[in-house]
Image (tube, grey):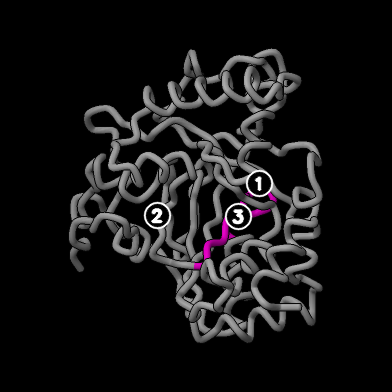
């Protein structure tokens, strides 16, 4: 077996594909989620992310904002943008009563670009997002495409809003140790809005991935020895993800000190049945995932009255 070819711009299929398990029905979805939980064991805390298109990179909205404007997202550029965003929010809009991290969380909720990556502590919520029905801007339903679930080990990396993380200034203006080299932090925000408890949501955040010479061994191109499978270069890593991660295969047991990330791909053909089972068996629907007026208005705009 040889490693996959270099990444194509805008697609992470070749980056995540060698590590994925393919889900083609409801039963397999539950079994593979259970296998992730079993592999991780109760000693590890997992956070999950579901995306409706398996070809999407694991990029934050701020990272995508730079790419959409033809700019290379660097840590310095992200920090400069965040500082200007906070200044504008506080001075022009007078949203001056939150910490920097809380302000970014509110901006994220209303669709603004931040480095926060939405995740959940509930794997079935991630499965719902991975199979969610999507619509174009006119409200026309789009055809289903393959979706993806990620599971991240976030044990012992939870953020508390202390004097550092709860400060008015950006906590990473003076980068924490390992900010760009280590795995991302996870923050479980208070219930600022109805969606946070409904989705059991949290945020992943970290610096733009980087590694020193010889430090890229966590970025193997596929399961197997790095000498055989090859390693991704940093520019290829950045094409696929805006946070550091360590991909693992589900067919192997973990070392005691491992900090794995897993991925499952949901086939387009399986989505309809999985959506129906999530609603019928577990009560997950558009109204329970998006229980606010924004959710209702958007649902009506999509012609689902």
Q: In this view, does 288 lie above or below 68?
A: below
Query: Mark 2 — residue?
Result: 57
Label 3: few (<14), some (14–19) or many (≥20) C-alpha neighbours in 10 Å: many
Which numbered mark, 1 or 3, is in the foreground of this view?
3
Give the magenta range: 39-52
Decide: marks 1, 3 in contact (CB < 8 A)?
no
**Which quadrant of the figure has residue 158?**
top right
**Which quadrant of the figure has residue 168?**
top right
Is 43 colored magenta in this rendering? yes
For marks 1 and 2, give the CA distance: 23 Å
| Callout count | 3
Residue 298 drawn at (x, y percent) = 68, 64
Q: In the figure, is residue 88 to the left or right of 77? A: right
For marks 3 and 2, give the CA distance: 15 Å
Tag 1 secondary structure: loop
Q: Residue at x 58, y 73 (%)?
A: 139
Query: Mark 1 — residue?
Result: 45
Tag 2 secondary structure: loop
Q: Residue at x 43, y 55 (%)?
A: 248
Q: Residue at x 24, y 41 (%)?
A: 235
Query: Mark 3 — residue?
Result: 48
Is 301 colored magenta in this rendering? no
Of 163 and 191, the residue lying toward us: 191
Q: In the figure, is residue 135 to the left or right of 234? A: right
Which numbered mark, 3 or 2, is in the foreground of this view?
2
């Amino acid at each position: 077996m040889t490693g996959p070819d270099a990444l194509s711009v805008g697609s992470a299929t070749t980056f995540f594909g060698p590590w994925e398990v393919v889900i083609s029905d409801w039963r397999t979805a539950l079994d593979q989620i259970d296998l992730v939980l079993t592999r991780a064991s109760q000693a590890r805390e997992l956070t999950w992310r579901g995306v409706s298109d398996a070809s999407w990179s694991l990029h934050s909205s701020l990272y995508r904002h730079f790419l959409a404007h033809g700019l290379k997202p660097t840590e310095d550029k992200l920090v400069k943008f965040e500082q200007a965003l906070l200044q504008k929010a506080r001075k022009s809009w007078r949203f001056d009563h939150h910490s920097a991290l809380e302000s970014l969380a509110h901006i994220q909720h209303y669709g603004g670009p931040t480095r926060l990556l939405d995740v959940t502590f509930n794997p079935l919520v991630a499965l719902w997002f991975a199979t969610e029905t999507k619509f174009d801007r006119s409200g026309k339903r789009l055809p289903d495409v393959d979706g993806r679930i990620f599971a991240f080990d976030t044990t012992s990396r939870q953020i508390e809003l202390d004097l550092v993380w709860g400060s008015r200034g950006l906590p990473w203006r003076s980068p924490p140790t390992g900010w760009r080299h280590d795995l991302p932090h996870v923050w479980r925000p208070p219930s600022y809005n109805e969606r946070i408890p409904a989705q059991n949501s949290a945020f992943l955040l970290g610096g733009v991935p980087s590694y020193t010479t010889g430090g890229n061994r966590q970025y193997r191109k596929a399961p197997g020895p790095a000498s055989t499978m090859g390693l991704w270069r940093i520019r290829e890593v950045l094409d696929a993800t805006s946070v550091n991660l360590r991909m693992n295969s589900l067919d192997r047991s973990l070392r005691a000190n491992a900090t794995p990330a897993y991925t499952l791909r949901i086939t387009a053909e399986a989505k309809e049945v999985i959506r129906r089972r999530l609603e019928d068996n577990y009560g997950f629907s558009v109204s329970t995932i998006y229980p606010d007026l924004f959710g209702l208005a958007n649902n009506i705009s999509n012609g689902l009255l």
